[in-house]
Amino acid sequence: MKKHSLLVLDAIINLLLGVLLMIFPRPLVDFLGIPNAVNSFYPSLLGAVLFGIGIALLVHQYLPRIGGLGLGGAVSINLCGGLVLAYWLLMGGLDLPMRGLVFLWVIVLVLVILSVMELHSSLQPSRQ
């Protein structure tokens, strides 16, 4: 997959997750079977950060003179998020229904696979 496509895909994932976390809809949280929060303060802050990362990826791709977040930053963020989530799933003693575990493990897999693809793309000769 080309670097352009990977950055745009990564941006879309971050933007969507960011919006979901910023509004943190309780019915969706219950439906997915993921841990709930006492209030939406921290989830909404995390959502804003993810949304900002998505914007930074798009800026990097479409407005290169301004800068933005490149593949290296995206890999760092995705691996960090994916590995911390995997740690919580393995060691955190979370009492989640099966659908919550499946949903969160899918997120781990998406983040790790996307990171591997981005690393592979970044190590290839520049062919945008």
Image (spheres, helix red, strand yellow):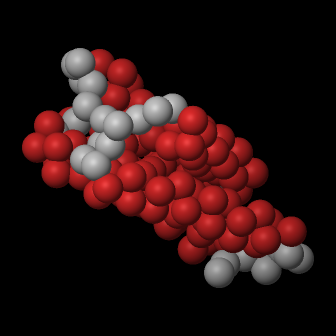
The N terminus - image quarter: bottom right
Between 15 and 111, the one lying in front of the other is 111
**In-image side of 72 versus 56 (left or right):** right
Q: Is residue 100 above or below residue 45?
A: below
**Residue shown at 69% from the left, 70% from the top:** 117
**In-image side of 86 versus 102 (left or right):** right
Between 74 and 85, the one lying in front of the other is 85
Q: Is residue 74 above or below residue 117?
A: above
Query: x, y percentage for residue 114?
Result: 61, 65
**In-image side of 127 versus 103 (left or right):** right
Q: Is residue 116 above or below residue 50?
A: below
**Residue shown at 22% from the left, 36% from the top:** 24
**Residue shown at 53% from the left, 63% from the top:** 110
Query: x, y percentage for residue 113?
Result: 62, 67
Q: Tell me if I can see residue 48 in this picture.
A: no
Query: x, y percentage for residue 42?
Result: 36, 21
